[in-house]
Image (cartoon, helix red, strand yellow):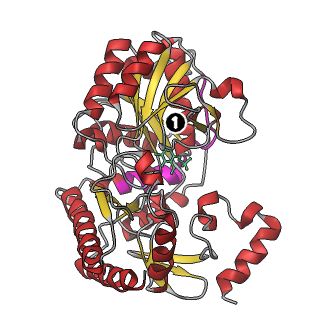
Amino acid sequence: MTISQDLFKRAQDSIPGGVNSPVRAFNGVGGTPLFITKAEGVHTFDADGKQYIDYVGSWGPMILGHNHPEIKQAVLAAVENGLSYGAPTETEILMAEKVKALVPSIEKVRMVSSGTEATMSAIRLARGYTGRDKILKFEGCYHGHADSLLVKAGSGALTMGVPNSPGIPADFAKHTLTVSFNNLDEVKAIFDQYKDQIACVIIEPVAGNMNCIPPVEGFLEGLREVCTDNQSVLIFDEVMTGFRVALGGAQQYYNITPDLTCLGKVIGGGMPVGAFGGKKEIMDYIAPVGPVYQAGTLSGNPIAMAAGLKALELLSKEGLHAELEAKSKALCEGFQAAADEAGIALTTNYAGGMFGFFFTDAKKVTSYQQATECDLERFKKFFHLMLDEGIYLAPSAFEAGFVSTMHSDEEIANTIDAAKRAFAKL
Ligand code: PMP
């Protein structure tokens, strides 16, 4: 028995499923999750002392690699002054100013402690601001686990949502409308059906929770237009894409201006942080200036702000995001060439520092439907073969992969070599 196996067995006696967030349990790939003891640069280390090249990066935030010395130093310096005050600090202003400077559509920003809180609050704000109840999301997009957002499409297109989990009243879920990602015709049809009722559209501008699916040309532009025409709030959930796809997020990469933006993980440099921000006029609807309530004891926590501010400073380095995208590209092209040579049907997607690969005959994957039709058994086998090779990929076929500035050409080449050996065994 490995130490991870032993720990997992023990964990299940006192933690539901042995984990504090479901995807960590390896349910999507089978086997025992690795218990991590340390992470440094491009590597994570498990309880059995094995080292992995990590492409999960704590599910996105580790754009600069794990335990960056300057972020660590910023945290240690902040700790000297206490862990939390529940009162305003200057660091929060510096953080807000930095976010505004990097993401110009954000005129005002409110800090929270997770991505879930960011999207939940942004939705409440959009509903309060417009005085409408319905919201529109896309099949396969994940926006955290708030009731309104943990909703799947009803049977057939253009229907009201149904809860994705027990504990969510159908009466809540029915206000969440769901259509297909990358399908503007469905968006237009649902706006016709629910005229003047849709408060907002929320979207991952590059979907990262159904593998990695970038928007097709014209899709985000079309969404922007439909929202403007219908006075609905356009919310970009950039919890994953923010500061990763480009310094200014997917909105900069695709040159689309949303009304509100949700941010997460990345702005904490790995600490528990989220944020939502956007047009001044909308943001001023939030308490204490406006009537829409939203609050948080640990919001703007001084340690998290110190870590995040340093991370954003470091991420602002000229050329960093072009380098990051070159790494995604090299990895995807390497996987593709290796798969082609081995006669394995595969296609890849990437945008900036996020990537995905699909075991499918399809030339390009642009929809949730296609993502679900991929060969999931093959993914499972590949995942474990790569893990044996010391490569830690996301333990699910429905999660994007992430590169960091620390992934060197050599590590990417080693990853592609490992994939070659894995493909030969599939
Ligand atoms: N939005 C997106 C796009 C996400 O990927 C996630 C989490 N992976 C969330 C929201 C929720 O963030 P958190 O897990 O911090 O609540």
271 vs 30: above or below: above
- Which quadrant would the C terminus be assigned to in this image? bottom left
**Is residue 259 shown to the viewer in this render?**
no
Among the 4 quarters of the image, the one containing residue 349: bottom left
Indicate left or right for 69 with 141 as reference. Answer: left
Kind of residue indicated by mark 1: Thr
Name the residue: 56% across, 42% down.
Answer: 116
Say which residue label 1 marks: 119
Q: From the top left corner, tell me how far across and down residue 120 is, in percent.
A: 56, 33
Q: Is residue 189 magenta?
A: no
418 vs 329: above or below: below
**Is residue 378 shown to the viewer in this render?**
yes
Among the 4 quarters of the image, the one containing residue 100: top left
Name the residue: 45% across, 75% down.
Answer: 382
Name the residue: 55% across, 25% down.
Answer: 159
Name the residue: 67% across, 26% down.
Answer: 172
Q: Which residues are magenta?
A: 293-311
Q: From the top left corner, tell me how far across and down residue 229 is, in percent.
A: 32, 13
Q: From the top left corner, tell me how far across and down residue 151 is, in percent.
A: 60, 36
Q: Is residue 294 magenta?
A: yes
Label 1 lies in ligand 1 vicinity (Cβ under 8 Å): yes
Q: The residue tagged with tag 1: helix, strand or loop?
A: helix
